[in-house]
Image: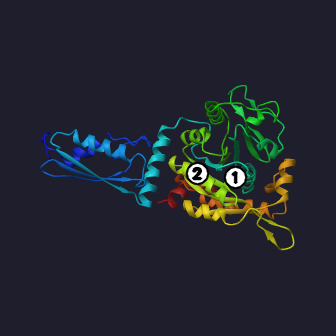
Amino acid sequence: MNNNPSEPTAERVWAALRGVIDPELGENVVDLGMVASVDVTRDGVVDIGLALTIAECPLRDQIEGDTRRRALSLPGVNEVFVHTTAMTKRQRAELMSRAREKARERAEPTQVSPTTRVIAVSSGKGGVGKSSVSVNLAIAIKNLGFRVGLMDADIWGFSVPRLLGITARMEADDVTRLIIPVEAHGLKVVSTGLIIDSEETALMWRGLMLAKALEQFLKQVDWGDLDYLVIDMPPGTGDIQMALSRMLPQAEMVVVTTPQRASQKVAARIADMARRSHMPIVGVIENMSGFDCGHGTVHHLFGQGGGQELADGIGVPLLATVPLDMRVVEGGDRGRPVAGEMPLYGAALAFAETAELLVQLVPPAQDETCTGRLAKLLEGLAQSGQDWDSLAALTT
């Protein structure tokens, strides 16, 4: 390494570039892997290769300018050239992984365990059956033997209590002062609809209050040990969505749309917001995909193919096509969701199959961690009457 402080070196340029912060991600471009190369000539000319998430990045000029100024601040640097390219798909994935890890480090603690899988069921607009999907998906996952919570984050437009037939109200524990979720259909449920006097009461809250309500649901509710937390998100890309990505960085999104093109185009916006917030998108659910009249003919009342087109456009799988089914409507009105009813056919079967696929794509934490594997080995040894020495023999 050149020890002359008046002569620029690649090492000194790399160090200086740690002062360039990506405004959107809040981290320096070196740690984020956005600096592809640094070359320094003897006459003080510096060539820097930058890799941005997309070539048309709206922050490109700012990042290039900051990069140039940081390099020019070094003694002996006479000229700086910045060459910008777009990241490859693999580089973008690595960047998102780093960004999410940083978000986890900065996130304030909540009552939701870091090992709980969080599924944010989202839509670009209302009217696509997102809440029905959230409720039935949560029950279908519970039916597979998992511990599941359901949070109604649609603060203004709450509908989860009615869909589950809940009339009770949430209360706080006298000792911990934490809110106790209401249990219904085997789920732990939290909703603003379980706080107010009646479901006809209008909540006229501004955006800051909405985010505070979400924060309370995350920090002041005794969720206990959950494998999955399903969140019924409000439609669109507002305060709740931004707050969730900040407070629960482990959250992953499922996008709900209907077959028609208009709905699919609007749903693409929520996918774009997820990407900007570095929230992984698990897949797309196409709701109301067709109506089976019972005579062997399926009527596509809202068109065809919107869900698959959206999934292809954002590069994720189509998790399910949920048909129009009168039992979904009737079950929601009676507080008996179709996913909990037998026999499994129509929408009930679609939700059951979606849950099975979802837990494969987003497996419970204990199924994929070393600690989880160790716990399973210990449990198996205990059941067979073996001891710790037996475990040591298995793992050496």
Residue at x-position 69% and y-position 42%: 151
Any part of residue 350 in sight: yes
Relative height, residue 391 to residue 103 (above, below): below
Q: Residue at x 63, y 53 (%)?
A: 266
Q: Position of residue 396 (x, y in %)?
A: 46, 60
The image's colour scheme reads rainbow
Q: How many numbered circles does the render carry?
A: 2
Residue denoted by label 2? 269
Q: CA distance from mark 2 to mark 1?
A: 31 Å
**Could you say which is closer to the camera, residue 50 or residue 61?**
61
Amino acid of disc 2: Arg
Secondary element at image label 2: helix
Residue 66 location, x and y as percent?
32, 41
On residue 4, which mark appears? Answer: none
Q: Is residue 247 left or right of residue 49?
A: right
Give neighbour class at mark 2: few <14, some 14-19, many 20+ (Cα, 10 Å).
Answer: some
Q: Is residue 153 left or right of residue 164?
A: left
As drawn, which residue projects farthest toward the bottom? Answer: 296
Any part of residue 227 in sight? no
Q: Which residue is mark 1?
A: 146
Identify which amino acid the numbered label 1 is placed on: Phe
Q: Residue at x 77, y 47 (%)?
A: 186
Check disc 1 and report its element: helix, strand or loop.
loop
Taking 34 as reference, is 335 left or right? right
Write down the quadrant of residue 199 in the picture: top right
Frontmost residue, 215 versus 115: 215
Could you tell me residue 65's position as x and y percent? Answer: 31, 43
The front one of 78 and 12 is 78
Q: Is residue 366 left or right of residue 332?
A: left
> Considering depth in this image, is 186 or 79 the residue closer to the camera?
79
